[in-house]
Amino acid sequence: MEFGYYPGCALHGSSNDYEKSIRACMKVLNAGLKELDDWICCGATAAHSLNHKLSTALPARNLAIAERDGVGSVLAPCPMCSMELIKAGRALRESEQMRRQMSEIVELKVEGKTDVINLIQVFERIGIETIKSAVKNPLADLKPACYYGCLLTRPAKVVQFDDCERPRSMELILEALGAAPVSWNYATECCGAGLTMANEATVLELANKILKNAAGSGANCIVVACPMCHVNLDMKQSAVERRYDTAHGLPIYYLSDVVGLALGLNKKELAIDKHFVCARAQVKR
Amino acid sequence: MARIGVFICWCGENIARTVDIEKATAEVAKIPGVRCAINYKYMCSDPGQAMVREKIQREKLQGVVVASCSPHMHLKTFRAAAKTAGLNPYLVEMANVREHCSWVHHDKEKATEKAIGLIRMTVGKVLRNRALDPIKVPLTKRALVIGGGVAGIQAALDIADAGCEVVLVEREPSIGGKMAGLSETFPTLDCSQCILTPRMVETGQHPNIKLYSYSEIESVEGFVGNFKVTIRKKARYIDIDKCTGCGECWTKCPSKKTPSEFDYGLANRTAIYMPFPQAVPARPVIDKDACIKFKTGKCGLCLKRCQAGAINFEDEDKLITEEVGAIVTAAGYQLYDIGKDQPNAKLSGYGEYGYGEYADVITSLQFERLSSASGPTSGEIKRPSDGETPKKVVFVSCVGSRDNAKGISYCSKICCMYTAKHTMLYKHKVHDGEAHVFYMDIRAGGKNYEEFVRRAIEQDGAIYHRGRVSKITRENGKLIVRGADTLVGEPVTIEADMVVLAAAMRPAVGVLELAQKLKLGYDEFGFLSESHPKLRPVETNTAGIYICGACQAPKDIPRPWRRRRRRRAKCW
C-alpha cells in the first residue's frame, strides 16, 4: 500500500519528530510514503484570512502535482494542511470556472480529484485488524486522552471525518493497541493554535484546561494527531506549569508514536526523545 | 353542435399574473363546441358561481369547463352550482390552470399557450362525458380511532357521545398517551391528570366505545363507509375480564429491574406491571422479556397469588376483524433522539450534550415525570444521579428543532411554553434554585401564552439567555454548560446540577407503517398530511380517513381539543 505524502511546513521544520515517527511506523507496516515533488505551502491561516483566490491556488498547486504524478490518496498529517487541501479540492470539483482559473494560475491542469486524508485515516486504510495483529508490545499501561483539537474533525462539512463533536476514531486505534483511552471533555476543544506566537497567555490558559481535564479524567498521557497541538501541549507545558503553578508532567504523543511503540519500535526510532515532556516510565526503551 | 361553457378564473392574481386571461378567453371561444367563454376574478365566489348558473340556463349549456385551480379544491363547488342550475353535475369538469400552469411557469406567453391547451383538452373530455346518477351504498355507522392519547380519547368520546359506536385501538397497555405522564399543563398550571383521567374513565366505561388496549392495526381493507380492519390483540398474558386489578401479582413479582416506560427510565417496574395507577383498563400486563417464568420456566409467583385465575402464560396474539365506516388516526408523537444513534440518516444527534452519558442530563418528558405528583419522586425535584435537589438547572430549548444541520427544520411549537412552565414548576418547589433557559426565539403565540412566559421571567425569576448551547461536559460533579448569550455578545458558562433538554417533536414510532396501511400521505418529516391545510384540515386524501393530534404536526394540548367539533361533524 502506498500513499502520497504532503508534509507541509511543520513536518519539515519544527515537527520533524512527527515525520520521523510516521515514517518509522509506515516502514514496519509495509506502507510506502511518496512525498509530493516540489510541494509548496498550503497557505494556512495567513492565506485564507487575506486572499480567497490565493488560499485556493496554493493548495491547488499541490493537488495539481499529485494529479500530474498519478497519486490518488495523499496523507497530509497536519490538519490545517489537510483542511486547506480538501477545501480547495472541493471548490475545484464544484466549478468548471474554478478549474479553468486555477489550472491557469498554478500552470498545471488541476481537477481536484485527489483524495486527501489524515493520519488516522491512513491507519484505518492499512486496517485496524492488520495493525492489531502486528502489535508486539501491547500498551496495557497506557491511559491516553485522545485529543483531536479543533481542526481534525472541522469544519464538519469540509473534512467529513468522524462525528465532529464526539469523535471516536482515534480511540478505536488505541484500543486495538491494548491501551485504555479515557473519556474526557476536551477532545475537540481548541488549543489556541497559532496564537502561541501572538498571544501566548491565551494558549497557556487553554492548554492548562486541556491538560488539567485530561489528568483529572484519569489519563496518563495525551495522544494528538496535529503538530500545532503538540507544540502547545508539549513544548509549552513547562510554561503552563510555571504560569499556573502546577505540575502536569503529561507526556504528549503523536498517534504514530503510540502505534510505533506498540509495533515494537523504540523511542529513539520514533523521535520521542525529542519531545519536551519526558516520556517517563511508559516508554521503557 | 354541442353547447359547452368555459369559465376562466383569475384566482385573484394567482392565474392572471402568468396567464393572459383575455387572450385565453378569446382563443378558447373558437374551439368547436364551445358556446361561450367568460372570465372572472374569483369564479368560486358567489357572483362567479352566479355567472356559471346564469350561463347554464340562458345558453342551455350541455357541459361546463371551469379553468381554475385543482379539482381537489373546487370541483364539488362548481358541480353543486351546476346542479342548482339544472345541469347534471357530472358534465362539469375542471382544467387546472393554476397548479399545473400559472404556479409553475414564468413565461407569460408560453403559459398562456399551455393554459389554452389544458382547456382544449378538458373541453374534449366534457364532449365525451355522459350524465350520471349517483348510487347509494350502505355504510357502517361505526368509527375506528387509532391511538388512545388525548387526541384519540377526545375523538372517541365525541363520536360516541354523538350516538355512534367507536372502536378505539391503543398499542400501549393503557390509554392516556403522553399526557397521562405530564405534571401540570400550560398556561393555567392545572394538573394534567385532573383534566385527562376523568376522560380516560369515561372512555373505558362508555357504552358506545369498544376499547382494544395493547393492540395494533394489522391491516385495513375497503373504502369510505365500509372499512374492514384487522386488529392484532397482543398477548397480554392476563385475562382482563377475569382480572380485578387487585395488585397481588405486581406487588409480589420478584423481577423488579425493568426501566419503566411510563417514567422514561427514571424508575423501575416489575415484569408483571400496571403502567401507572390510573391506567385504563386498570389491568396489568406481563413483559415477556423481563418475566422470570418466561426466561427460566421457574417462578410463576403471580399465577399462584392470583385469586381470579386471570393469568395465562399460554396467551397468544389474536387477530380480530372489525367493520367501520370511518377512521380517525391519532397516532401521536415521540421525542427526537438526542444521542448519536439515529433512526434516519438525515438526522444527526447532539452527542455533545452528553445525554445518555450523564444521568443528570434529561429530556423534557423526564422532567415532567420528576415534577409530577405521580412520578418516581412524588413531585419532588430530585436529580436522577444521587437524589439531591438541584440548585441550578439549565433548560435548553430547540434541541433538534429549527436546526437544518441536525435534520429538522420545523419549530416544535410547544417547547417555549413547556420550558417556561418547567422553570415555574422548578422555582415553585426549589425557592432558592436558579433556572436558566437558553433559547433562540420565544414563540408563545396563543391565548395567555406570552403572558405566561413573561410570568416565568418576571415573577418567578427564570433567567433567559438568548443563544445556543455548544457543549455540556462534567467536571467535579457539576455539569458545565457552555453556550452563548447573543444579546450580550458573550460566551456563557453555567455550572449546573441538572440540565433539561427540550427535544423536538417527531411523529410517533410506526406512523409511517400505519400511513402505508391506511394509504395516507406524509411529509418529509413523517407527519401525516391533511387534504388541505385550510379547507380540509382534518381530512386526508383517502376518503373516510381523518387525522388529529400530533401525528399531523407538533401541537399543544388545547389544539386537538378545539378541532374535535369539526371532526365529529365530518365523520357523519
Image (spheres, rainbow, N blue to C red):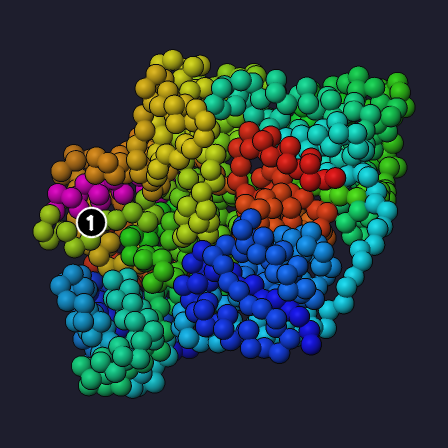
- Say how many tags the image has: 1
Taking the spot 31% from the left edge, 76% from the top edge, the residue there is: A95
Q: Nearer the viewer, residue A228 or B66?
A: B66
> From this viewpoint, which residue is outermost toward the left?
A198
Is A35 drawn above or below residue B224 in the view shown? below
Residue B263 horizontal side relative to residue B403, left or right: right
Residue B25 horizontal side relative to residue B540, left or right: left
Is B464 drawn above or below residue B6 in the view shown? above
Q: Nearer the viewer, residue B271 or A225?
A: B271
From where the camera sits, is residue A240 visible? yes
> x and y percent of residue B133 in the render?
80, 58
Tell me the kind of residue under disc 1: Gly
Taking the spot 73% from the left edge, 43% from the top edge, the residue there is: B327
Q: Nearer the viewer, residue A222 or B392?
A: B392
Taking the spot 16% from the left edge, 34% from the top edge, the residue there is: A245
Is A87 drawn above or below residue B170 in the view shown? below
Residue A12 horizontal side relative to residue A183, left or right: left
Residues rendered magenta in the picture: A200-220
Q: Secondary structure at mark 1?
A: loop
On whether residue B222 falls in the magenta region, the answer is no
Q: Nearer the viewer, residue B459 or A210?
A: B459
> From this viewpoint, which residue is outermost toward the front?
B58
> x and y percent of residue A225 in the render?
31, 58
Taking the spot 20% from the left edge, 75% from the top edge, the residue there is: A57
Main secondary structure type of the part rendered in magenta: helix
